[in-house]
Image: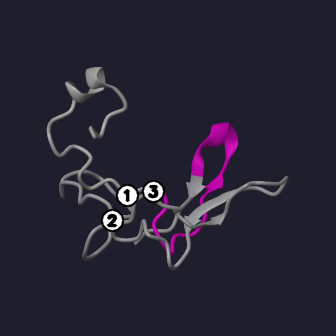
Amino acid sequence: MPCAASKKNVKNYPPGWCLNDLVADPRFQRFAESDSPADFRLEKDSPARGKGIVLPADWADPLRPKAGRPDIGALPFGADAPTFGRRGRITSIMQR
C-alpha cells in the first residue's frame, strides 16, 4: 500500500519518503479539550522525544540539543512555555 493517499501523490514523493513516519499520541502536557489553554510541550514519555531531524549546524536554532536528535514539535521536552507580547511576538523562551 503506498504511503501517500492517492496514486497522483505517490508520484510527488520518492520511495521511502514516509519510511520514518511516526503516528502516535504525542502526549502533550495539556491538549485543549475544554476552556483551559493548551500546552503543547511534550510529556516525559512522549514518543516524539529524540525523533526529530538534526538541522544543519549553520541554521539558527536556539533550542538545538547539545547532543543527539531533537524532539519533534515546536517545543522540545523540558522547554519553558513561551510568553507572548504585543502583536504575538515571543517575549521569552528557554535557551538550551
> Who's the residue at 27% across and 46% down the image?
18
The amino acid beneath tag 1 is Leu
Q: Residues within 10 Å of mark 2 (few under 14, many from 20)?
A: some
State which quadrant residue 82 falls in: bottom right
Relative side of 12 to 26, left or right = left
Measured along the vertical axis of the image, is residue 87 above or below residue 67? above
Look at the numbered disc 3 and give the secondary structure of its residue: loop
Point out which mark residue 51 bears: 2
Point out which mark residue 22 bears: 1
Residue 5: in magenta span: no
Q: Which residue is mark 3?
A: 73
Look at the numbered disc 2 and give the secondary structure of its residue: loop
Is 22 in front, or is 77? Answer: 22
Tell me the magenta residue range.
74-90
Q: Quadrant of the N terminus?
A: top left
Look at the numbered disc 1 and give the secondary structure of its residue: loop
Q: CA distance from mark 3 to mark 2?
A: 10 Å
Q: Quadrant of the C terminus?
A: bottom left
Marks 1 and 2 close (CB-CB < 8 Å): yes
The amino acid beneath tag 3 is Gly
Q: Residues within 10 Å of mark 1 (few under 14, many from 20)?
A: few
> Who's the residue at 25% across and 76% down the image?
67
Q: Nearer the viewer, mark 3 or mark 2?
A: 2
Secondary structure mostly taken by the magenta-highlighted segment of the chain: loop
Task: Give the mark nearest the N terminus, 3 or 2.
Answer: 2
Q: How is the image coloured?
A: one colour
State which quadrant residue 80 falls in: bottom right
Is 20 in front, or is 40? Answer: 20
State which quadrant residue 52 falls in: bottom left
Task: Give the mark nearest the N terminus, 1 or 2.
Answer: 1
